[in-house]
Image (cartoon, rainbow, N blue to C red):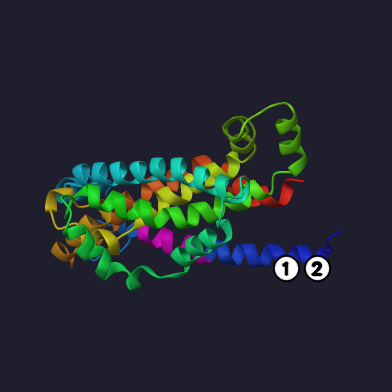
Amino acid sequence: MISRRERVLNLTVLVFMSLVVLIPLSLLVLAALSPTPNGRPDLGDLRWDNFVTAWQQSEFGSHLLVSLTVSLSVVAITLVITPLAAYGLAVLKAPGHKWVFLLFLAGIMIPLEGIIVPLYFTMRSTPFASTVVALIIAHAGLSVSFGVFWMRAAFRSVPGGILESAMLDGAGPLRILRSIMLPLSAPALITLGLLTFMWTWNDYFLAFVLVNNPDQLPVTVALGSFSNKYTTQYNLMSAAALLVALPIVVLYIVFQRRFIEGVLSGAVKG
Protein backbone atom coordinates (compact mmCIF):
# COMPACT_ATOMS: atom_id res chain seq x y z
CA MET A 1 0.00 0.00 0.00
CA ILE A 2 1.15 3.53 -0.81
CA SER A 3 1.02 5.93 2.10
CA ARG A 4 -0.62 9.33 1.89
CA ARG A 5 2.76 11.01 2.09
CA GLU A 6 4.01 9.04 -0.90
CA ARG A 7 0.86 9.87 -2.87
CA VAL A 8 1.27 13.56 -2.15
CA LEU A 9 4.94 13.41 -3.11
CA ASN A 10 4.16 11.57 -6.35
CA LEU A 11 1.41 14.06 -7.22
CA THR A 12 3.72 16.99 -6.49
CA VAL A 13 6.43 15.59 -8.75
CA LEU A 14 3.92 14.89 -11.55
CA VAL A 15 2.44 18.38 -11.32
CA PHE A 16 5.91 19.94 -11.36
CA MET A 17 7.03 17.93 -14.37
CA SER A 18 3.76 18.73 -16.16
CA LEU A 19 4.34 22.44 -15.61
CA VAL A 20 7.91 22.11 -16.86
CA VAL A 21 6.52 20.75 -20.13
CA LEU A 22 3.28 22.73 -20.47
CA ILE A 23 4.55 26.22 -19.65
CA PRO A 24 7.13 26.41 -22.50
CA LEU A 25 4.62 24.77 -24.86
CA SER A 26 1.95 27.32 -23.91
CA LEU A 27 4.39 30.18 -24.47
CA LEU A 28 5.25 28.74 -27.88
CA VAL A 29 1.57 28.54 -28.85
CA LEU A 30 0.96 32.13 -27.69
CA ALA A 31 4.01 33.31 -29.64
CA ALA A 32 2.69 31.53 -32.74
CA LEU A 33 -0.62 33.40 -32.38
CA SER A 34 1.01 36.76 -31.74
CA PRO A 35 0.06 39.63 -34.06
CA THR A 36 3.55 41.13 -33.82
CA PRO A 37 6.80 39.71 -35.26
CA ASN A 38 8.48 39.74 -31.83
CA GLY A 39 6.09 37.04 -30.66
CA ARG A 40 4.68 39.00 -27.73
CA PRO A 41 1.40 37.35 -26.64
CA ASP A 42 -1.84 39.27 -27.06
CA LEU A 43 -4.91 37.32 -25.90
CA GLY A 44 -7.18 39.94 -27.39
CA ASP A 45 -5.79 39.50 -30.91
CA LEU A 46 -4.94 35.88 -31.72
CA ARG A 47 -3.70 35.50 -35.28
CA TRP A 48 -4.51 31.98 -36.45
CA ASP A 49 -3.56 33.01 -39.96
CA ASN A 50 0.09 32.89 -38.85
CA PHE A 51 -0.06 29.13 -39.40
CA VAL A 52 -1.36 29.63 -42.93
CA THR A 53 1.36 32.19 -43.65
CA ALA A 54 4.09 29.93 -42.27
CA TRP A 55 2.76 26.99 -44.27
CA GLN A 56 2.66 28.92 -47.53
CA GLN A 57 5.94 30.79 -47.21
CA SER A 58 7.92 27.69 -46.18
CA GLU A 59 6.27 25.33 -48.71
CA PHE A 60 5.85 22.83 -45.90
CA GLY A 61 3.45 20.70 -47.96
CA SER A 62 6.15 19.10 -50.10
CA HIS A 63 8.59 18.80 -47.20
CA LEU A 64 5.97 17.16 -44.98
CA LEU A 65 5.38 14.64 -47.77
CA VAL A 66 9.11 13.88 -47.87
CA SER A 67 9.26 13.38 -44.09
CA LEU A 68 6.16 11.20 -44.18
CA THR A 69 7.59 9.06 -46.99
CA VAL A 70 10.93 8.61 -45.23
CA SER A 71 9.39 7.89 -41.82
CA LEU A 72 6.82 5.38 -43.08
CA SER A 73 9.39 3.62 -45.27
CA VAL A 74 11.84 3.29 -42.36
CA VAL A 75 9.07 1.99 -40.08
CA ALA A 76 8.02 -0.60 -42.67
CA ILE A 77 11.59 -1.82 -43.21
CA THR A 78 12.29 -1.94 -39.47
CA LEU A 79 9.11 -3.86 -38.64
CA VAL A 80 9.89 -6.45 -41.28
CA ILE A 81 13.59 -7.01 -40.62
CA THR A 82 13.89 -6.72 -36.83
CA PRO A 83 11.32 -9.37 -35.79
CA LEU A 84 12.95 -11.88 -38.13
CA ALA A 85 16.44 -11.13 -36.84
CA ALA A 86 15.31 -11.07 -33.20
CA TYR A 87 13.46 -14.37 -33.65
CA GLY A 88 16.60 -16.00 -35.00
CA LEU A 89 18.64 -14.72 -32.06
CA ALA A 90 16.17 -15.20 -29.21
CA VAL A 91 14.21 -18.33 -30.18
CA LEU A 92 16.00 -20.26 -32.93
CA LYS A 93 19.41 -19.66 -31.32
CA ALA A 94 21.16 -19.32 -34.67
CA PRO A 95 24.87 -20.26 -34.72
CA GLY A 96 26.92 -17.47 -33.20
CA HIS A 97 23.80 -15.70 -31.96
CA LYS A 98 25.59 -14.32 -28.89
CA TRP A 99 28.32 -12.69 -30.96
CA VAL A 100 25.87 -11.39 -33.52
CA PHE A 101 23.82 -9.84 -30.73
CA LEU A 102 26.93 -8.06 -29.47
CA LEU A 103 27.31 -6.50 -32.92
CA PHE A 104 23.78 -5.14 -32.68
CA LEU A 105 24.57 -3.76 -29.23
CA ALA A 106 27.62 -2.04 -30.69
CA GLY A 107 25.33 -0.44 -33.26
CA ILE A 108 23.33 1.08 -30.40
CA MET A 109 26.30 2.27 -28.39
CA ILE A 110 28.28 3.93 -31.20
CA PRO A 111 27.02 7.53 -31.57
CA LEU A 112 25.92 8.85 -34.94
CA GLU A 113 28.72 11.43 -34.90
CA GLY A 114 31.22 8.57 -34.92
CA ILE A 115 29.97 7.09 -38.20
CA ILE A 116 28.58 10.09 -40.07
CA VAL A 117 31.75 10.70 -42.11
CA PRO A 118 32.15 7.14 -43.50
CA LEU A 119 28.37 6.96 -43.93
CA TYR A 120 28.41 10.15 -45.99
CA PHE A 121 31.21 8.95 -48.29
CA THR A 122 29.57 5.55 -48.64
CA MET A 123 26.27 7.10 -49.68
CA ARG A 124 28.02 9.54 -51.99
CA SER A 125 29.49 6.62 -53.95
CA THR A 126 26.04 5.13 -54.60
CA PRO A 127 23.41 6.16 -57.20
CA PHE A 128 21.23 7.38 -54.32
CA ALA A 129 23.55 10.20 -53.24
CA SER A 130 21.72 13.26 -51.89
CA THR A 131 18.29 11.68 -52.34
CA VAL A 132 15.47 10.51 -50.11
CA VAL A 133 16.47 6.90 -50.81
CA ALA A 134 19.86 7.47 -49.17
CA LEU A 135 18.13 8.88 -46.11
CA ILE A 136 15.76 5.90 -45.92
CA ILE A 137 18.64 3.41 -46.17
CA ALA A 138 20.66 5.22 -43.50
CA HIS A 139 17.76 5.52 -41.07
CA ALA A 140 16.72 1.92 -41.60
CA GLY A 141 20.24 0.71 -40.92
CA LEU A 142 20.47 2.77 -37.75
CA SER A 143 17.04 1.62 -36.54
CA VAL A 144 17.72 -2.09 -36.97
CA SER A 145 20.16 -2.32 -34.06
CA PHE A 146 17.72 -0.96 -31.51
CA GLY A 147 14.84 -2.84 -33.13
CA VAL A 148 16.59 -6.19 -32.78
CA PHE A 149 17.49 -5.42 -29.16
CA TRP A 150 13.88 -4.40 -28.42
CA MET A 151 12.19 -7.36 -30.13
CA ARG A 152 14.67 -9.88 -28.75
CA ALA A 153 13.71 -8.79 -25.24
CA ALA A 154 10.02 -9.07 -26.15
CA PHE A 155 10.44 -12.58 -27.61
CA ARG A 156 12.45 -13.74 -24.61
CA SER A 157 9.58 -12.72 -22.31
CA VAL A 158 7.21 -15.20 -24.00
CA PRO A 159 6.85 -18.31 -21.75
CA GLY A 160 8.79 -21.28 -23.08
CA GLY A 161 5.90 -23.63 -22.34
CA ILE A 162 3.85 -22.02 -25.10
CA LEU A 163 6.59 -22.65 -27.63
CA GLU A 164 7.04 -26.25 -26.50
CA SER A 165 3.31 -26.89 -26.83
CA ALA A 166 3.31 -25.44 -30.34
CA MET A 167 6.25 -27.63 -31.34
CA LEU A 168 4.49 -30.73 -29.99
CA ASP A 169 1.47 -29.84 -32.10
CA GLY A 170 3.68 -29.81 -35.18
CA ALA A 171 4.08 -26.06 -35.68
CA GLY A 172 7.19 -25.08 -37.58
CA PRO A 173 9.43 -22.06 -36.89
CA LEU A 174 7.58 -19.75 -39.29
CA ARG A 175 4.18 -20.82 -37.94
CA ILE A 176 5.33 -20.18 -34.38
CA LEU A 177 6.59 -16.74 -35.37
CA ARG A 178 3.43 -15.81 -37.25
CA SER A 179 0.81 -17.29 -34.94
CA ILE A 180 2.41 -17.01 -31.48
CA MET A 181 5.40 -14.72 -31.19
CA LEU A 182 4.13 -11.77 -33.20
CA PRO A 183 0.60 -11.67 -31.68
CA LEU A 184 1.96 -11.95 -28.13
CA SER A 185 4.57 -9.28 -28.85
CA ALA A 186 2.19 -6.92 -30.67
CA PRO A 187 2.43 -4.12 -28.03
CA ALA A 188 6.24 -4.16 -28.26
CA LEU A 189 6.04 -4.19 -32.06
CA ILE A 190 3.65 -1.22 -32.12
CA THR A 191 5.85 0.69 -29.68
CA LEU A 192 8.89 0.00 -31.85
CA GLY A 193 7.03 1.38 -34.85
CA LEU A 194 6.04 4.52 -32.95
CA LEU A 195 9.57 5.11 -31.64
CA THR A 196 11.08 4.57 -35.08
CA PHE A 197 8.61 6.97 -36.66
CA MET A 198 9.27 9.67 -34.05
CA TRP A 199 13.05 9.32 -34.24
CA THR A 200 13.03 9.44 -38.04
CA TRP A 201 10.60 12.35 -38.20
CA ASN A 202 12.56 14.42 -35.67
CA ASP A 203 15.97 13.78 -37.25
CA TYR A 204 17.86 16.84 -38.40
CA PHE A 205 21.56 16.00 -38.35
CA LEU A 206 21.48 12.96 -40.64
CA ALA A 207 19.15 14.60 -43.16
CA PHE A 208 21.21 17.79 -43.14
CA VAL A 209 24.37 15.85 -44.04
CA LEU A 210 23.02 13.33 -46.55
CA VAL A 211 20.44 15.34 -48.51
CA ASN A 212 21.50 18.47 -50.43
CA ASN A 213 18.62 18.64 -52.90
CA PRO A 214 16.31 21.51 -51.77
CA ASP A 215 13.27 19.71 -53.20
CA GLN A 216 13.90 16.56 -51.13
CA LEU A 217 14.60 18.08 -47.74
CA PRO A 218 12.58 16.69 -44.82
CA VAL A 219 10.53 19.07 -42.77
CA THR A 220 13.06 19.48 -39.94
CA VAL A 221 15.79 20.72 -42.29
CA ALA A 222 13.24 22.89 -44.10
CA LEU A 223 12.32 24.40 -40.74
CA GLY A 224 15.98 25.31 -40.20
CA SER A 225 16.10 27.06 -43.56
CA PHE A 226 12.83 28.83 -42.78
CA SER A 227 14.16 30.09 -39.44
CA ASN A 228 17.23 31.51 -41.20
CA LYS A 229 15.00 33.51 -43.56
CA TYR A 230 12.65 34.80 -40.87
CA THR A 231 15.04 35.26 -37.96
CA THR A 232 13.23 38.31 -36.59
CA GLN A 233 9.68 37.01 -37.10
CA TYR A 234 9.29 34.91 -34.01
CA ASN A 235 5.55 34.45 -34.48
CA LEU A 236 6.00 32.76 -37.86
CA MET A 237 8.94 30.71 -36.58
CA SER A 238 6.84 29.49 -33.64
CA ALA A 239 3.94 28.65 -35.94
CA ALA A 240 6.25 26.68 -38.23
CA ALA A 241 7.74 24.80 -35.27
CA LEU A 242 4.25 23.81 -34.09
CA LEU A 243 3.36 22.59 -37.58
CA VAL A 244 6.42 20.35 -37.56
CA ALA A 245 5.70 18.97 -34.09
CA LEU A 246 1.94 18.49 -34.59
CA PRO A 247 2.07 15.06 -36.33
CA ILE A 248 4.18 13.59 -33.51
CA VAL A 249 1.89 15.02 -30.83
CA VAL A 250 -1.21 13.63 -32.58
CA LEU A 251 0.48 10.27 -33.08
CA TYR A 252 1.37 9.99 -29.41
CA ILE A 253 -2.10 11.05 -28.25
CA VAL A 254 -3.75 8.44 -30.47
CA PHE A 255 -1.39 5.60 -29.57
CA GLN A 256 -0.38 6.51 -26.01
CA ARG A 257 -2.15 3.48 -24.52
CA ARG A 258 -0.40 1.16 -26.96
CA PHE A 259 2.89 2.89 -26.27
CA ILE A 260 2.60 2.33 -22.52
CA GLU A 261 1.54 -1.29 -23.07
CA GLY A 262 4.61 -1.88 -25.21
CA VAL A 263 6.96 -0.37 -22.66
CA LEU A 264 5.46 -2.45 -19.85
CA SER A 265 4.83 -5.64 -21.84
CA GLY A 266 7.96 -7.35 -20.56
CA ALA A 267 6.87 -6.79 -16.96
CA VAL A 268 3.34 -8.17 -17.27
CA LYS A 269 4.03 -11.33 -19.25
CA GLY A 270 4.62 -14.41 -17.23
| Amino acid identity at mark 1 | Leu
Nearest the viewer among 170 and 25 is 170
Instruction: Relative to 60, say whether 117 is above or below.
Output: below
Q: Residue at x 24, y 52 (%)?
A: 134
Find residue 59 and report its horizontal and vertical position in percent.
16, 46
Q: Which residue is mark 1?
A: 9
- Near-viewer residue (200 or 26): 200
Query: Dots 2 and 1: beta carbons under 8 Å?
Result: yes
Total numbered badges shown on the rendered structure: 2
Quadrant assignment, res 181: top right
**Secondary structure type for disc 1:** helix
Residue most extreme to the top: 169
- Amino acid identity at mark 2: Arg
Q: Which residue: 77% across, 40% down?
A: 161
Q: Residue furthest front?
A: 95
Q: Is residue 180 above or below residue 265?
A: above
- Classify residue 261 by image quadrant: top right
| In this picture, residue 125 sits left or right of residue 259 | left
> In which image quadrant can residue 42 be found?
bottom left
Task: Report the span colored magenta.
Answer: 20-28
Magenta stretch: residue 115 in it?
A: no
Which secondary structure lies at badge 2? helix
Where is residue 80 drawn, in percent x and y?
45, 40
Q: CA distance from mark 2 to mark 1?
A: 6 Å
Residue depicted at x 29% and y 49%: 136
**Residue that label 2 marks:** 5
Q: Position of residue 103 (x, y in %)?
A: 48, 63
Q: Which mark is residue 226?
A: none
Q: Is residue 21 magenta?
A: yes
Please tell me how crowded label 1 is: few (under 14), some (14-19), or many (20+) other residues with Cα within 10 Å: few
| In-front residue for pair 266/42 | 266
